[in-house]
Image (spheres, rainbow, N blue to C red):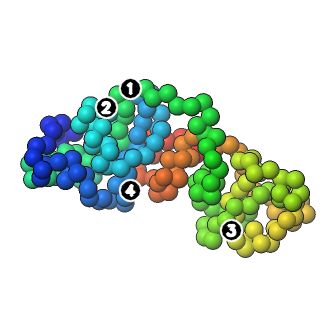
Amino acid sequence: MASHAKPSGPSGSVTGLAHRRPGRDGGRVLVLNATYEPINVCTVRRAVILLLKQRAEMVEEGLSALRSERASVARPAVIRLSTYVRLPRDAHRRKITRRAVFARDGWECQYCGCRSQLTVDHVIPRSKGGSSEWTNIVASCAPCNRRKGDLLPRQANMHPRREPVVPHSSVFIHVASPVIPAAWKQWLPEAA
């Protein structure tokens, strides 16, 4: 990190340092627990505050520096919390959302591989007793979803490419940032 010194004066404030959003990651920083497990995504501003308060350390620097009139700070890309944060055991069982299903399924239709017009599909339709659980919902493009309708997979001759499973908790990192910056990839599990 270029400087841990706290900027002074109004022009050297943290807000002045971190208000810009350069780069392809849109101003997002990956937050790791003290054990190096990915737990969250935060803004650059929040990450700089955690660093300045010494509640986190920089693990990966971004490509550019954050500058104010009186200070320059390396732009964080990945930070690690100084103390362990206990997460609920069922953190991976968060509410099922469309974006979470898309992230788990790699942002592609599980029937044809298409990456546009995504919707969600119940593999076993609710009209046939299917549940609204992770293990019965997949990403589907609109044409495939219409074609399958309320038929069972064997009736429609449409089977998901991968069996739907409860995702690893890191899927929510992919929900917060669908495009994963290169600096984050080594910290995230392959099968998110």
Tell me how far mark 3 sits from mark 2, CA to CA. Answer: 43 Å
Instruction: Give whichever of discs 2 and 1 has the lower sequence position.
Output: 2
Tell me how far mark 3 sits from mark 4, CA to CA. Answer: 26 Å
Mark 4 belongs to which amino acid? Asp
Q: Quadrant of residue 51?
A: top left
**Which residue carries the number 2 mark?**
55
x, y (%) of residue 9? 9, 46
**Which residue carries the number 1 mark?**
83
Label 3–label 2 contact, CB within 8 A: no
Residue at 50%, 47% (x, y): give it. 173
Tell me how far mark 2 sits from mark 1, CA to CA. Answer: 7 Å
Label 3 neighbour load within 10 Å: few <14, some 14-19, many 20+ = many
Mark toward the viewer: 3 or 2: 2
Q: Is residue 146 left or right of residue 58?
A: right
Label 2 neighbour load within 10 Å: few <14, some 14-19, many 20+ = some
Label 4 neighbour load within 10 Å: few <14, some 14-19, many 20+ = some
